[in-house]
Structure formats: C-alpha cells, structure tokens
Amino acid sequence: MSNQVSKVVSINAAGRERGPGMRIINDCRQQLGDALCRWLTGIRPTISEELFLLADGTRERLLQTSYLDLRQDIEREWNIFVDAFRHGLADAVTVSPAAVQEIPDFPDFAGLQLVEDETLSEQIVIREFSAQLAETCDEQLYTLDRRIAALLGHEEPVAGENPLSPGIICQALTEGAAALGLDADSRLLLLRRIERHLHLALPALYHDINSNLIERGILPDLQRSFKRTPSATSAPATTTAGALKAAADNVPSPAGDLLGTLQRLAAARSGQMSGEASPEALLSSLPPLATPAPVNAAAISHAFLASLNEVQHQEWTPGASVLQNQVRVVRDSEAAQQVSPIESVTIDIVAMLFDFIFNDDELPATVKSLVGQLQIPVLKVAMLDQSFFGNRQHPARRFLDGITGVALHWGAGADENDPFIRRLELLVTRIQQEFETNVEIFSEAIGELETFVTAHEAEETATLEVAADAVIRREAEEAAAERVQAALKPLLEKPQPEVVRQFIADQWAAVLRQKALTHEAEHPSWHDTIEVAEQLIWSVAAKSDPDERLRLISALPMLLARLNAGLSLVGTDTDARSAFFDALVELHAAALKGSLSPAVPAASTAIAPAVSAPAAREAAS
C-alpha cells in the first residue's frame, strides 16, 4: 500500500510541477500524434475500397465521378493528408498551460454576409463529429481529462484545456482534408468515412495514453465513481453513432441542401436530449413544459413559440462591452429541451449565425446592437420556415444581408446620429414589435432599406459630382489665370498710354481668361485675342509716316469691332465700355497727327464703333 502511494505524483505546488507536467503532456501528444498517423496510413486501403463500393452502388453519373475522383486523390496524395493532419495536430496543441485555449465551438468567419450553406453544413458536421467521438470515448476521457488537469496543476478539469481532446483531432482531420484541395462535399464525405473507423480506434489510443500516465504515477488509483445507466449513456451513444454511420452510408447531399443536413443531424442527436441545462435569467419567466416526454409535438412547438414571443417583446439591453447571444440563452432554457431534434439543431444554427455577426470587427457596435434585437424574430422565422437556410432570397435573409452589407459600405464610423442608423433603428423596432408569423414584414423592411440606400447613394453621387466639377473648374481657372498672366506680361511692358495699359490689365484680361477656359494655348481664337491687344497698343502709338496713318485708318474698323466683340463676350458694363472708347478717340486722333498719345482720362464723349476712312484722312491732314 505504501508502495502504491509512493508512486503518486504530487500535484501540490502547481508552479513547481508545471515544467515536468508539460513535458509529460507533450510526450502524450507525441504518442497520440504518432499513433493516429500510423492508423491513418493503415486505414487508406479500407477507405479507398469503401469509395469504390459507393461508386459501384449508384447509377448517378455525377456521384460516381465524385466517389472515384476522391478515391483517386486518396490513392495518390494520402501522404499529403497525413502530413497536414500531423501539422494541424501539432499547431492546435500548445506547449504551455497559459496557451492552452478552449477549441471554439464555432469558426470565426470574416465578413458579415450569411455563411455559405456548404460551409455551415461542414462546420455543423465537424462539431457533431467531435461530440460523438467524445461520447464514444467517454470512459477513457473521464480519467484522461483529470490526469491532464493534474499535470496542469488543476484540481478539476477545465473545459477545453485537454490538448488531446477529440475536438483537436477533428480540427486536424479537417485541415488534412483541406490540404487535398477537395470541395466541401468531398471533404465531408472523407471525414464521414474516417469517422466510422475512428469510433473503433480512438478509445484504444486513449487507453494507451492513460496506461502510460499510470506507469508514470499520474493518479494511478483514479477510477470513475459511478457507472452511467444504459438509458443515459449507452442508448444515446448507440443511437447517435448508428445514426451518423447511416448518414455516412447515404448519398451526400448537394451543396446548399442544408435541410437534408439538418435532418441527418437531428436524427443523430435524437437520443441525446438532456434536461440538465438550466435557463438563464432572461428566460426565467418562460412557462414550464411539464411533461418530460410530450405526446403532442405540435403543442410543444406552439408553446415554445409562445415563449419566444415573450422574450421578443422584452426590452433589448445588451451588456456594456459584450453583446448577449439571446439564442444561446434560449437553447439552454427548459422550454427548449422539449422541442424536436431538428428544431434543436435549428436553434444551434441561428445561434452560430449571430455569433458570426457579433464577432465581426468591421461592423460598428451600433449596428451589432440593432442586429441583436432581431435574434428572436430570426429564430422564429427559422423554426417556422425551414427554407430560411436554403433560400438566399428569403425576406429575413435578405434583410440581414442588406443590413450587414450596407453597414460595411457605410463604414465603422457610423454612430447613433447617422441617417442609416436612424432608419435601421426604425425598421428593427417595427419588426421586434410587430412580427408574429408573417415574414412579409421583412420584405417591407428590406424594400424600405433599399429605397433609402438608393436615394442616399443618388444624393451622395450628385454631391460628389458637384464637388468634382467644382474642383475641376477651380483647377481650370487657376491654369487659365497663369496663362493669362504669362500673356499679359510682355504686353504691359510695352510703351503705351496708361488708360490702354489699365484697359488691357483689367477688362481685356477678363476676355483672355474666358478664352483660356474654353480654348487651348495653340487655338487660333486664343492667339487672335492676344493679337487684338497688340494691335490696340500699336494703334495709339504716334504715326509720323503717311503709310502708317493709312494703315491705321484701314485697321480701325476691324480693331474696334474685335474689341467690342471681346467685351461683349465677358459682359463688360456699358458705361465702362463707353468711357474707354471715348478716351480711345482722342488717343487715335493724336496718333494720326503724329504726336505721342497723351495719357488722357476717360473722355465723356462717346465714339462710334468704327471710323470712316475719309474722316480719318481729314484728321490726318
């Protein structure tokens, strides 16, 4: 007796034993990984033969091709599968107690759209796969979990801390199947074939690990203090294992046939409904369903929906930092224990859906809070209409997709004062208050949401177009101003009366800017406008030569006409135009006399737009 006691490894002072404990755990991990890889290598011919028999037993051409293609992949690349499984197992199992994390119940999908049906089916099957393996290996895991807890310095097992658990094995098998590049249907088919045989092999592997730990003195006297009754354990285990095997023998459902998946999972779970879970505070007021074995399923479903109605109309009060998944609370309630197996699976799927939404970091918290208010209405829809999962055009699905899609487009900065948030709050409140069984309320909501988004986007587009036009116009004006300044510089540097210089710098510069906005620098119209200014400066210079006087007289009508046309183009004020032309009369008269043009102020006498040739000659003489 004393010798027996001396073999027991003390688990006091956990920190002191933590290092040796982890070394033992890592040895067990290595033992399990090596054993499973050897087992997988040996099981390949059996699975290959099973796939051949499946192909031979069906007349559907596509199914035959699917079975034979998978068989060929296994024959050629099974070593890739085994290697990926080994790496997946090593990566999933951590090597320090602080890093041992609970394997999540559900995958963390990126993005906020509803999960693809085939992906959701795969995740549900994997979760069930893990649960059934745990059921099959219950006796071995009872002692193994406690020995692992002792090695980690815990008095009792902590959920998810066992790095040798079936959940980790299933995850590694999934990664192995993914390494073969298989589609979702083929991955599920392969996992089902493996599962059939793993139920027989895994208990022995766990037994070997327990034996190894006993030899090392890890709780060698540990025994289970009770035996589970056949009604509580054996029957459900047999039922669920048999159901899963039967499902594996059936033809795999095509992608998108989620209802078929639900039915198979419901059959697999039909024997393991338990009443151990207690309802959370939120559902404490749900009416109890007295009979543990109801004789009227329709009445039970009706009563459960009535209970959901009570929860739906309670005020939504999410936690300060964490949104509560109400569907999970419903699932653990006493009322939910009485629903049918397929309804139980439906509750699980809807709970997963909202987990994905609440875990998405890209969604604003305000949107998550509003979506959270739709949990019970969406659960009711899913239970009333099984097409919710398979029909992408289902009004409730479209509304959820619309909310998440628009929210991502809107950006994470949306707050409670954002117009989208305000409109969404109105729609969600209406659904929460008014929805009973008519799903058309979701159709109306998605219609209003689409109308709002379309109108807002049209307004946003118009605003952006106006802003873009303003930017383009401003840039064009800046470029035009630079070109005008470059053109004016040599003109203003020439000798000329001040009145002409001022006219060119102000009024004619406006004409140049207009031309620069509408014509390129090489356009004839731009050069003509500059030429008018040059000709104006020449026209007021003294003309001592008779030929120059005649040339001026000939050019004056066209010059005055071009000046008037330019000023009309920019809408020059009539008074300003008349004042300049009055001054120009005196300047031209002085030029024809051969004297320097005086810097006269604007004259009060208007001039005609054109000067006749005889009058000019008379003035010149």
Image (cartoon, rainbow, N blue to C red):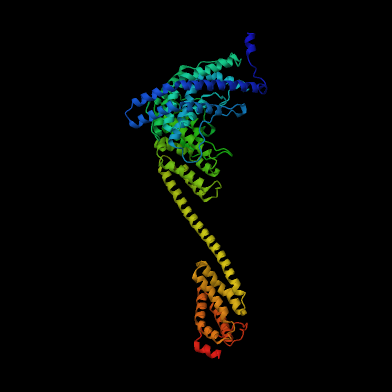
Please provide percent x and percent y for residue 401.
46, 43
Residue 240 quadrant: top left
Q: Which residue is drawn at the image coordinates 53% and 24% (left, top)?
A: 165
Q: Which residue is drawn at the image coordinates 52% and 77% (left, top)?
A: 563
Front position in the image: 324 or 87: 87
Please provide percent x and percent y for residue 525.
49, 71
Front position in the image: 269 or 153: 153
460 up-or-down from 123: above or below: below
In the image, farthest residue toward the top: 1
Please provide percent x and percent y for residue 565.
50, 76
Front position in the image: 184 or 138: 184
The image shows a total of numbered marks equal to 0
One can see residue 131 in this view: yes
Please provide percent x and percent y for residue 74.
43, 27
Q: Which residue is drawn at the image coordinates 58% and 66% (left, top)?
A: 482
One can see residue 333 in this view: no
| Left or right position of 443 against 489 | left
